[in-house]
Image (spheres, helix red, strand yellow):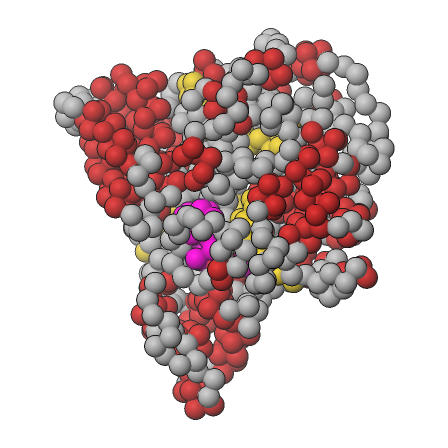
């Protein structure tokens, strides 16, 4: 059994100037790259397959398998694109990782690009995180100067160029095919699949798109072995991962643990709910994953465990809300978000999210009409599985799950404003402060 | 997408000279430099528009035309991109763009009250600029710092754990020209200077500020206190620092020990059922989820 918390990605975050090359190399940084360059690209792919690493951006697709889909007989250039567009509400793991230790990602980019035989890689980072972008730019520059990137890396004959690319504010660009359109200088709208990006991605060339944490997990696997990685976690969810605890808890933050830890364990470790608070509901992996309640405290937070509880592990963004919180208010706000971020390409999402907001707004102000809950569920049913990409599906998750667990609050919305049932001031972290 | 081959690539000197007139010559040169970073020039459009904003204070018609000419696409195509992304502004932005996160978690934790307070204090609405041209106020969607909620961003730098009072103090300091440092970053620069960094021109401030704030280190600190670490790796150690000695303590005992240093709860950590409970669970996720949510 592993320890309760297993810092690997976060292990150097408390070092002085952790973001610098000097600091990163002092803990063995870039040793993984050197080791990988001494092997064939195929064996690096096999190693990552054997480790059981699954995508940390939400869906949990096996990373090594994704790399294996790249057709090496395709004469076009191959590309690696890192999805650093972390924007899923509640999700806050990749940004602190890149802020504290950008070289972990850069080393992962170098190894992963080598494995898929890409000579150009892009880090697509959301534009709204200026200091993270500074750190990434500097890390890439340092890596070039040290010979970890560029021509003939460490005498291997392998060349790699890395471009840090800042986005411009669009949640949809976290969807991998929308990200590709955005990276090609277009509006970020998802593409029809197939063809999948592995076959026709950036510039219609074979492309791997991976989440930051997935790529950042590669160097430690190369250094320590597939068996080491898979000794952590559960049967089908291997390795350690970053859990992001936020909301009405005593000690919000990043907790790196083997997959399969429970929210109860994490709360106990971190001091529990805030003073006088009881857990009311939580998201396991961002707002697109159906909410759960106190009855799910012991669900193992791995891909299968959360799926078995009717939700998804997602990004492991544990947003925790206490009894002062109005579910209707939260669901409305999330739905407004999806409406705002809908790219407009497909009708179910573009129109559906707009109508969902209309109904939820009146429920929040206590002016709901008979049958509104059925209307909401019916609209969700017409969006889920009918939208062009996962954004539409995600928009329905908070609504259907909230109605499932807290239907009475939606019913109350037909006569009583949510702010009367749950005074909003009580949910804040500064309840005592006189404001607004 | 629309036709892209209708306009010839403006390699000719006359076209370049025509384009030079739109923006200062050095800006035109930098826009071309950005386009040249990519295997296909159009990939440079997003950073190019950031550069336009850094020079013009917003996305101007001249900036759109300049990008279009350099990339050999129509102004309408550039406009289509510029209007899609929320960071591109068509009205002048103040020296300091103050963004208040009002996505669900930050809103509930106090973001809504912070925004209301700032609207009143600055006498502006959402996406409006103060009369002195100093501050543009806007509500934001999730900015990936939920463990520091409620969050305010100034020129895309983090201001963590804000309150209505601290937010008022912040904007007053910004307006008076006082030194204002981000919670986890450097002294804030102007919005235009920030846009230049986003265009890919570093400002040399990467080494300012800490590696991480307290919430980022919360789990690591507990692991350090408890002596918890990842298993030893193939080369004998999972990490270069610290001990390679592996604890033999079970998670149950360790959890109980963790409890003893806290006064507030008696709850015991129960042994994770992770290895026991879901062997019978189907491994597959529903097709919709596994196939579609891949990289979100």
Quadrant location of the N terminus of chain A in the rendered image? top right
Residue B123 appears left or right of B163: left
As displayed, is residue B198 above or below residue B293?
below
Q: Give the image quarter of residue A229.
A: top right
- Which residue corresponds to the image point at 69% horizontal and 54% vertical from the top-left? A114
How far across and how far down the image is residue A177, in percent? Answer: 45, 51
In front of the other: A200 or A264: A200
Residue A170 among those drawn in magenta: yes
- Which residue corresponds to the image point at 40% horizontal and 44% vertical from the top-left? B141
- Which residue corresponds to the image point at 69% horizontal and 41% vertical from the top-left? A46
Total tally of numbered discs in the picture: 0
How far across and how far down the image is residue A105, in percent? Answer: 65, 48
Q: Residue furthest front?
A: A73
Q: Is residue A31 visible?
A: yes
How far across and how far down the image is residue A68, in percent? Answer: 61, 45
- Which residue corresponds to the image point at 69% horizontal and 15% vertical from the top-left? B251
How far across and how far down the image is residue A330, in percent? Answer: 35, 30
Residue A401 appears left or right of A26: left
Chain part drawn in magenta: A163-182
In front of the other: A353 or A206: A206
Q: Is residue A335 visible?
A: no
Q: Give the image quarter of residue B97.
A: bottom left
Q: Give the image quarter of residue A50.
A: top right
Quadrant location of the C terminus of chain A in the rendered image? top left
């Amino acid at each position: 059994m592993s320890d309760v918390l297993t810092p690997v990605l976060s292990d150097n975050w408390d070092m002085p100037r952790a973001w610098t090359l000097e600091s990163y190399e002092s803990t063995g940084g870039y040793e993984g790259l050197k080791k990988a360059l001494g092997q064939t690209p195929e064996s690096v792919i096999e190693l990552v397959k054997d480790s059981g690493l699954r995508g940390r951006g939400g869906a949990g697709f096996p990373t090594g398998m994704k790399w294996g889909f790249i057709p090496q007989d395709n004469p076009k250039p191959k590309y690696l694109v890192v999805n650093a567009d972390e924007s899923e509400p509640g999700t806050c793991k990749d940004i602190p990782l890149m802020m504290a230790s950008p070289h972990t990602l850069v080393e992962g980019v170098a190894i992963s690009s080598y494995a898929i035989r890409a000579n150009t890689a892009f880090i697509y980072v959301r534009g709204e995180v200026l200091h993270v972008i500074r750190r990434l730019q500097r890390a890439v520059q340092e890596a070039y100067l040290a010979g970890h990137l560029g021509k003939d890396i460490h005498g291997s004959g392998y060349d790699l160029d890395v471009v840090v690319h800042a986005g411009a504010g669009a949640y949809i660009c976290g969807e991998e095919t929308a990200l590709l359109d955005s990276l090609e200088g277009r509006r970020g709208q998802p593409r029809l699949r197939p063809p999948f990006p592995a076959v026709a991605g950036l510039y219609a060339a074979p492309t791997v798109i991976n989440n930051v944490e997935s790529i950042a997990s590669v160097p430690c696997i190369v250094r320590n072995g597939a068996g080491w990685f898979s000794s952590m976690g559960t049967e089908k969810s291997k390795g350690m991962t970053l859990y992001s605890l936020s909301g009405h808890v005593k000690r919000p933050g990043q907790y790196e643990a083997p997959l399969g830890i429970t929210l109860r364990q994490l709360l106990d470790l971190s001091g529990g709910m805030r003073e006088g608070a009881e857990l009311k509901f939580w998201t396991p992996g961002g707002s697109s994953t159906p909410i759960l309640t106190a009855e799910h405290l012991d669900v193992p937070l791995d891909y299968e465990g959360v799926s078995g509880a009717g939700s998804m592990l997602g990004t492991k963004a544990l947003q925790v809300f206490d009894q002062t919180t109005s579910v209707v208010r939260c669901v409305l706000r999330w739905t407004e978000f999806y409406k705002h971020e809908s790219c407009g390409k497909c009708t179910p999402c573009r129109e559906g999210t707009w109508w969902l907001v209309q109904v939820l707004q009146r429920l929040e102000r206590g002016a709901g009409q008979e049958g509104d809950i059925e209307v909401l569920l019916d609209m969700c049913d017409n969006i889920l599985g009918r939208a062009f990409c996962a954004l539409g599906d995600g928009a329905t998750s908070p609504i259907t799950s909230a109605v499932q667990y807290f239907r009475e609050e939606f019913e109350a919305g037909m006569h009583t404003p949510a702010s009367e049932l749950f005074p909003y001031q009580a949910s804040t972290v500064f309840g005592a402060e006189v404001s607004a | 997408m629309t036709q892209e081959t209708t306009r010839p690539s403006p390699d000719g000197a006359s076209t370049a000279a025509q384009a030079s007139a739109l923006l200062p010559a050095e800006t035109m040169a930098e826009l071309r430099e950005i386009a040249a970073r990519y295997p296909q020039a159009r990939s440079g459009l997003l950073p190019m528009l950031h550069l336009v904003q850094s020079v013009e204070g917003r996305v101007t018609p001249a900036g759109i035309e300049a990008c279009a000419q350099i990339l050999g696409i129509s102004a309408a195509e550039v406009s289509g991109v510029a209007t899609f992304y929320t960071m591109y502004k068509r009205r002048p932005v103040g020296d300091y763009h103050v963004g208040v996160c009002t996505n669900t978690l930050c809103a509930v934790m106090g973001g809504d009250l912070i925004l209301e307070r700032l609207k009143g204090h600055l006498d502006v609405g959402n996406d409006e600029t103060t009369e002195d041209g100093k501050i543009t106020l806007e509500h934001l969607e999730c900015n990936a710092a939920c463990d520091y909620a409620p969050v305010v961003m100034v020129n895309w730098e983090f201001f963590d754990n804000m309150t209505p009072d601290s937010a008022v103090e912040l904007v007053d300091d910004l307006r008076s020209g006082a030194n204002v440092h981000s919670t986890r970053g450097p002294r804030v620069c102007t919005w235009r200077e920030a846009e230049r960094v986003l265009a890919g021109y570093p400002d040399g401030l990467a080494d300012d500020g800490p590696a991480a704030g307290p919430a980022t280190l919360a789990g690591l600190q507990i692991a350090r206190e408890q002596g918890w670490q990842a298993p030893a790796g193939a080369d004998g150690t999972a990490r270069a620092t610290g001990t390679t000695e592996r604890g033999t303590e079970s998670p149950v005992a360790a959890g109980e020990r963790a409890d003893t240093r806290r006064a507030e709860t008696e709850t015991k950590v129960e042994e994770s059922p992770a290895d026991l409970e879901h062997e019978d669970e189907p491994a597959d996720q529903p097709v919709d989820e596994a196939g579609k949510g891949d990289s979100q």
